[in-house]
Amino acid sequence: MEAGVSSARSEPADTGRLLSVSFRVCVVVIAAAGLLMFGSVRVAAAPVNCPPGAASQGCPVPKRDLGRYLNIVGANAGPALPFVLGDAFRLKAGGRGRRLPGYDPGVCGSLLRSPNGRYLLYGTSLNGWPALELLDLATGSRSLFQARACDPAWGSHGLIAYLRYSRYSAVTGRYSGRIIVQHGLAGVPSTWTGAGAWQSPVWAGGSLLVGSNADAVIPGPLMIFYGPHHSRDVGEQRGGDRRPFSSVVAVNPQGTEALLDTERLGAGGGGAGAQDSAALIRISDDRILSTVVLNSNEAPGGSNVAALAPGGSWIGDQVLTTNGVFLGGSSHPPATLITLTVTGRKLRLRSVKQFIQNGQLPLTEDLDQASQATPLPGKPYDIAVWFEAIGQIRYLQCDTLTDHCTTSPDYQAAMTPTATFVTNPSRP
């Protein structure tokens, strides 16, 4: 019996990796085709007509328009927040590195620091299945936290939620299982959900926001669990209008409200030119307090935001995030920093600023991506962000008063597959 289980476990990793590699190759091919199809359109739509020959380097932006952009003009920046580069964790650039043996973002990309800062949960693979490893940052000791598990959420109240998998589909490339919750590292596990294709749990106080990718539309409906098997779909109270508010962008510092994005991709999703909006909800009763349109159907004068990316930061009444990315290699608006405010339960879109380099729009702007916009501690006008383009993974530090950014070396040039901040999106 055990031998059969072991054999079954070895199948998903090999199949999953093959699907993942095939998907990435497909994305690159489609994205390159998208660049050929849409590149000239992007340049032509820039705020100035490029002179002959300039398009090979990028399109210059008039100096009078620079206030609409974050200009990458400096060098020699280094991450000032806890981060992982490759398979090494550091509190900041130049700090002591802690290796993460077996870290496998292709199978389980989880990176989560405990609320007290002592422990780090990270994703590995074990016997062909995702697994969660625990690193004690004080002693350096490592241990297996959970086998067949991924996507942990660790609240300041001590509760740890994670996905425990029981099934893998070679057809869809997806794992399915249940959400498990326990108190602390040694707590007794409790099952909060039935079997399903759950993903990306986030604590908002004692409630758990959980996504789903069970259907052909990605991501799927969002649910709030108030306890074991006690839940509701976001939006279900609106007279049967179950709008798919699907992505958690950020949770406020009190853990009482969340900013969500509505964009859906795939069969039945929004499609090209669809209107995307963000919603502010109250966690306790799932009430939608405010909404704001993000892209105005990409009409002239609209903000041209494809979607709000998860991993945003909510500080005071301000939410910082970046432009979401269409999965599958579709063309999308270039990398931007997006600022929203929440005052008097009213959500407002305040600023959308595109990243440029030395006053120029990069020719491949449709393939750029920025993520994890995070304010630097003690520097309210400085933000950190990861910037990716073709062959580039860079850390940027930007002053939002001057709109100037400094950049790190290109980590991709050193064959580093992963560069990410280690944060905890859950709130009290």
Image: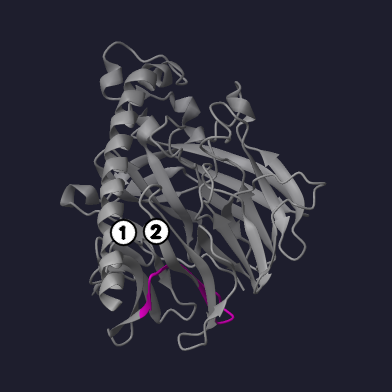
* Quadrant location, the N terminus: bottom left
Badge 2: how crowded within 10 Å, few (<14), some, or many (20+)? Answer: many
Magenta region includes residue 257: no
Residue at 62%, 54% in the rendered image: 222
Please, is residue 43 above or below residue 420 in the view? above
Q: Of helix, strand and loop, which one carries label 2?
A: strand
**Residue 410 in view:** no
For marks 2 and 1, the one nearer the N-term is 1
Amino acid marked by disc 2: Tyr
Please state the total of marks drawn on the protein image: 2
Quarter of the figure with the C terminus? bottom right
- Residue that label 1 marks: 12
> In the image, is 174 to the left or to the right of 217?
left
Tag 1's secondary structure? helix
x, y percentage for residue 67?
Answer: 50, 34
Q: Is residue 273 visible?
A: yes
- Name the outermost residue toward the top: 52
Q: Nearer the viewer, residue 198 or 67?
A: 198
Which residue corresponds to mark 2?
168
- Which labelled disc corresponds to residue 238? none
Q: Residue at x 46, y 89 (%)?
A: 186
Q: Is residue 148 magenta?
A: yes
Residue 318: image location, x then y, percent: 62, 54
Image height check: is 333 above or below 242?
above
Magenta residues (range): 145-161
Residue at the spot 80% in from the left edge and 48% down from the top edge:
238
* Tags 2 and 1 touching, CB below 8 Å: yes
Q: Determine whether, in the image, residue 374 is placed left or right of residue 15.
A: right
Residue 11 in the image: state x and y as whole percent.
27, 60
Give the distance between the C-alpha atoms of the residues marked 2 and 1, in whole angstroms: 6 Å
Q: Main secondary structure of the magenta part?
A: strand
Which of the 4 image quarters holds residue 156?
bottom right
